[in-house]
Amino acid sequence: MLLSKPIQDGSVVSLKLVNGDEIIARYDGEDSDTIKINRPLALTMGAQGLGMIPWLFLGDTEFFALKREHVFVMVPSKKEAADQYMQGTTGIALS
C-alpha cells in the first residue's frame, strides 16, 4: 500500500465537492469536522480554455472552513495549476 505524505499548511490543493464543484485553494489545516482553506477559486471552462474565477463573489472573507461531509476528495494541485493559482492570487509569477 502506498502512503502519501500529509498535506502541508500553505500548500495549494484541489478539492472536488459533493455537489460537483471543483475548487483550488491554499490549505490552512483541518480538524475532525472541517477543512480550512484560503482564497478558493472555482474552475470554469471559457473561450480560452480552463480558467479560475472567485468561488464566492460577494463574500467578505478569504478564509473558509468546509465541512468534511461536503468534500468528496482533496489532493495536492498539479504544479502548473498551483503556479497559475499563486500568480492569480498573489501576483507573484512562479516558474
Image (tube, helix red, strand yellow):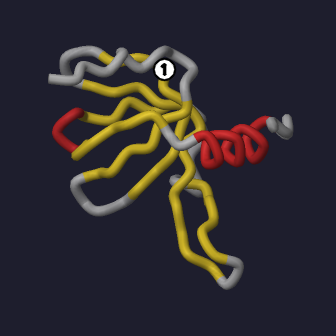
The C terminus sits in image quarter: top right
Q: Is residue 31 above or below residue 50?
A: above
* 73 relative position to 63: left or right: left
Q: Position of residue 31 (x, y in %)?
A: 27, 15
| Residue furthest out toward the front | 1
Q: Secondary structure at mark 1?
A: strand
Q: Quadrant of residue 92?
A: top right
What residue is rendered at 71% in x and 48% in y? Answer: 84
How far across and how far down the image is residue 3, in percent? 24, 19
Q: Is residue 20 above or below residue 65?
A: below
Q: Which residue is mark 1?
A: 28
Q: Residue at x 14, y 23 (%)?
A: 1
54 or 80, which is in the foreground?
80
Position of residue 61 measured from the top left corner of the image (x, y, whole percent): 58, 35
* Three-letter code, disc 1: Asp
**Residue found at x 60% / y 55%:** 54
In front here: 32 or 43? 43
Which residue is at 34% across, 27% downward? 35
Q: Residues within 10 Å of mark 1 (few under 14, many from 20)?
A: some
**How many numbered circles are shown?**
1
Query: Is residue 49 shown left or right of residue 91?
Result: left
